[in-house]
Image: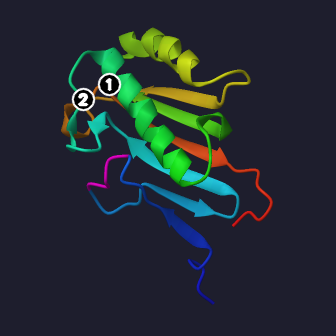
Amino acid sequence: MNIKSDRRPIITDRAPQAIGTYSQAIRKGSTVYLSGQIPLVPETMEMVEGDMAAQIHQVFNNLKAVAHAATAELDEIVKLNVYLTDLEHFPLVNEIMAEYFQQPYPARAAIGVAALPKGAGVEMDAIIEINDEDNG
């Protein structure tokens, strides 16, 4: 029995391509596990220009693109992890997050980290629960 047979990769060119040995997301049953997204612009694979707000918006847009590739929406995220190199930006994350989500908001953790790939100031990963008829 192949235990990987019910795992499906989620792939889209509307989000940055994986820069390592991972998938943009994996769907198992009705659950989608989204890999961490940093503020890379998909078309150039370069960091978005601008301030921290621009980085946060880019990360949410990247997560949204992967969610759409999994036939889901951001508001189907049940768990969101936010990694920040400076926790002083946490209020800005809250402000911008309110533009992408409505109540009830997903469960969330905000974690301060020393560094992120490519010098990013923010990274986010998520878990989505898809409520569709065929779950597959």
Q: Is residue 72 left or right of residue 48?
A: right
In the rendered view, would you say 118 is above or below 93?
A: below
In the rendered view, would you say 78 is above or below 71?
A: above
- What is the x, y in percent for residue 43? 25, 44
Residue at 20% x, 32% y: name it. 119
Q: Nearer the viewer, residue 60 or 127?
A: 60
Disc 1 to disc 2, C-alpha distance = 6 Å
In the rendered view, would you say 116 is above or below 102?
A: below
In the rendered view, would you say 100 is above or below 33?
A: above
| Residue sitting farthest toward the bottom | 1
Q: Give the structural element (helix, strand or loop) at label 1.
A: helix
Q: Is residue 50 left or right of residue 4?
A: left
The N terminus: image quadrant: bottom right
Range drawn in magenta: 15-19
Look at the image and tell me whether residue 86 can be seen: no
- Number of numbered discs visible in the structure rendering: 2
Residue identified by numbered label 1: 55
- What is the x, y in percent for residue 80? 56, 35
Q: Nearer the viewer, residue 114 or 116?
A: 116
Which amino acid, by three-letter code, is at mark 1? Gln
Instruction: Name the chief secondary structure element in magenta.
Output: loop
Question: To which quarter of the image does residue 78 belong?
Answer: top right
Residue identified by numbered label 2: 48
| Local crowd size for mark 1, using a 10 Å CA cut-off: few (<14), some (14–19), many (≥20) | many
